[in-house]
Image (cartoon, grey):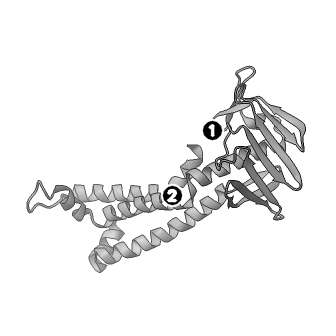
Amino acid sequence: MKIINRSIKKYGSLKVFLVLISILMFINIIILTSFDTNQKTFRIDGLSFKYAGLDNTVWLFKDKDYNLLKAYTLEGTKRLDYLSRMLIVEYKGQTIRYEKNLISLETKIFVDDLLIHTDSMIKISGDYTLSISDGTVQNPSEINEPFESKLMNEIINTSSYVLDVGLINLLIFSTLFTLLGTTHLIFPKAYWHLRHFLSVSGGEPTDFFIAATQISGLLLIIFGLFFPLVIPFI
């Protein structure tokens, strides 16, 4: 904080603000871009996939060898979720079909019309699932889950991130907090005058108010930069 205040006295508030906000936005973009890339990439049994785009209602992914994977619903909706009646995945000449019974919530997985797996588990919170048959809660890591079932889960999670979060929304949200925090940090007196201009005439903020405002600004900046780290746990 002392470095910031000395810089303000030496160079002026506006110059320090412009330099600091430029540095923070550069760091912000690097963090968010890295986070976004990580959220759009997943690995299953040593095979990695990366989100490649959305063609109308068809989700496109590519593996490390650039083989194309297509995922879509029978209903032709853009959103893929665990309550989709039928999710279809085309990959390496095979058609994987996930059929959900919306009454029993049982999922059947077919590969080229051959039934390979029946899933009676539903996702309830975080990484845990609930068995429909006996009501037990289990961690998927403890279940012998086939590749096709893992693939469906990762595709749904990635598509939900793209639709509900996405890089642009992250950038807007993060930028607002970074700007607000930097303003509190560099212009604490201006913040006080803005807050009390209708109730106080000719007053000045106390040292305690200035310090508290700058600390809150620093906390806002930290939150704005690193809040993506908590998204996977929400």
Query: Which label number is shown at residue 169?
Result: 2
Residue where numbered disc 1 is placed: 126
* Residue at 31% from the left image edge and 61% from the top image edge: 184
Q: Where is residue 57? Give x, y as percent.
A: 68, 54
Residue visible at 50% across and 53% down in the picture: 227
Q: Nearer the viewer, mark 2 or mark 1?
A: 2
The local secondary structure at tag 2 comes to helix
Along the horizontal axis of the image, is 73 left or right of 170?
right
From this view, report whether residue 29 is shown above or below residue 38: below
The amino acid beneath tag 1 is Gly
> Horizontal and vertical percent for residue 124?
64, 32
The quadrant in which the C terminus is found is top right
Position of the N terminus by quadrant: bottom left
x, y percent for residue 25: 47, 69
Q: In the image, is residue 222 above or below residue 231?
A: below
Earlier in the chain: of badge 2 and badge 1, it is 1
Q: Residues within 10 Å of mark 2 (few under 14, many from 20)?
A: few
Given the image, on which type of amino acid does mark 2 rest? Asn
Up the image or down, 107 lies above or below 161; here it is above
